[in-house]
Amino acid sequence: MIQAAVYAGVPAGNTAFTHAQKILREVGEQIGYAVAPQAPAASVHPGVGREGRTASSPALHYTVREPRNGKAPRHTVVLSHALGTDLMMWDGLANQLAADCRVIAYDHRGHGSSEKADGLYSMADLADDAARLLRELDSGPVVWVGLSMGGMVGQELALRHPGLVRALVLANTTSAYPDAAREAWQQRIATVRAEGIEVIADAVMGRYFHEGFRSAQAATVARYRQRLVTTDAVGYVGCCHAVGTVDTAARLGSIRVPTLVIAGELDQGTPVAMAQALVDGISGARLAVIAGASHVSAVEQPALFAELVCGFIDGI
């Protein structure tokens, strides 16, 4: 691979190393060789572009990939991650989209390498974070791709700052939770405050990934578990409150941009019925259901997820 990098260039070499690391981790699980999960900061970012932090507070860590074709970007795409993960969950899709788009990925407050803020957050706080990031980057209207919490932020951003949103992809997300689920989010907050994130980690992985994926892709699940338990507890609790109290249902009709809603067939946290409610509320929205996917569908079924996103962007 080093020799290939000499002839093919560093980006190609980085991509090869990334694929090799993934294969070694997965093969290691199968042959009984334990490969420790990497720390998030030590993971390879193939073609990551440039990294930065917002000047405004709390400071948000972000990456920007410019189009590899050297032309003006066809679109600017923002990738917004799920609760308890970080921008690295998007590396594969980001590099694919960067063939001809400008691609921005960022860490929500209290996640990854972004700063936390004390207290409980609202979805409006997270949407305003996104707005100031986009304004600092002078992005213009963007195609917003958000999964779970990222999809909730996308809805609120389109409502609070409509001039910043060109189109929406809302994956594995909801506009509101029923009362029982809201209470469950408050219980999770109380548990993390009292006992830390580790105590909920296995249950969260069970919600994020279905049993078959957890068995077949144990190393991938281990990496996401490691990312979860190393998330700042204050930031995690703050975002839990924003997620648990999300409520855009009565305002969805004010979203006036092309919208694709993606659901996972096996998703228990935001089931297909919640995705259908989004489609019913947003004029012109359409629904795609990924078979064999649970909550983090972009990781469980990356090729199908990318196909849906790219097809939608092609049609804008």
Image (spheres, grey):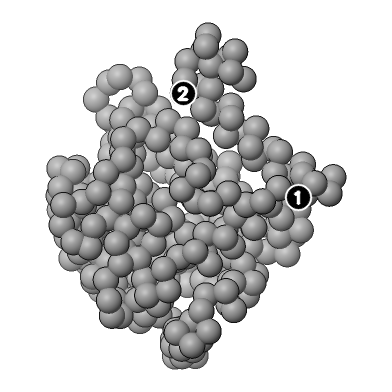
| Residue 273 shows in this picture | no
Picture coordinates of residue 112 (x, y %)?
40, 57
Residue, disc 2: 11
Asked whether 93 or 41 is in front, the reply is 41
Q: Earlier in the sequence, mark 2 or mark 1?
A: 2
Q: Which corner quadrant of the image does residue 252 belong to? A: bottom left
Picture coordinates of residue 59 (x, y %)?
23, 57
Picture coordinates of residue 84 (x, y %)?
47, 65
Q: Is residue 67 left or right of residue 236?
A: left
* Classed neighbour count for the residue bearing mark 2: other residues with Cα under 10 Å, few (<14), some (14–19), many (≥20): some
Q: Nearer the viewer, mark 2 or mark 1?
A: 1
**Whole-number angstrom distance, CA of label 2 to CA of label 1:** 28 Å
* Three-letter code for the amino acid on which mark 2 is drawn: Pro
Q: Which corner quadrant of the image does residue 265 belong to? A: bottom right
Picture coordinates of residue 184 (x, y %)?
50, 87
Q: Is residue 83 left or right of residue 72?
A: right
Q: Is residue 195 above or below residue 227?
A: below
Most extreme residue toward the top is: 7
What residue lies at 59% left-to-right and 62% top-to-bottom? 225
Which quadrant holds the N terminus? top right
What residue lies at 58% left-to-right and 30% top-to-bottom? 17
What residue lies at 62% left-to-right and 67% top-to-bottom? 205
* Three-letter code for the amino acid on which mark 1 is drawn: Ala
What residue lies at 52% left-to-right and 75% top-to-bottom? 197
The number of numbered badges drawn on the structure is 2
Asked whether 275 or 26 is in front, the reply is 26
Q: Is residue 265 left or right of residue 119?
A: right
Image marks 2 and 1: residues in contact by CB distance under 8 Å: no
Residue, disc 1: 34
Instruction: Name the element at disc 2.
Output: helix
Instruction: Name the element at disc 1.
Output: loop
| Residue 51 shows in this picture | yes
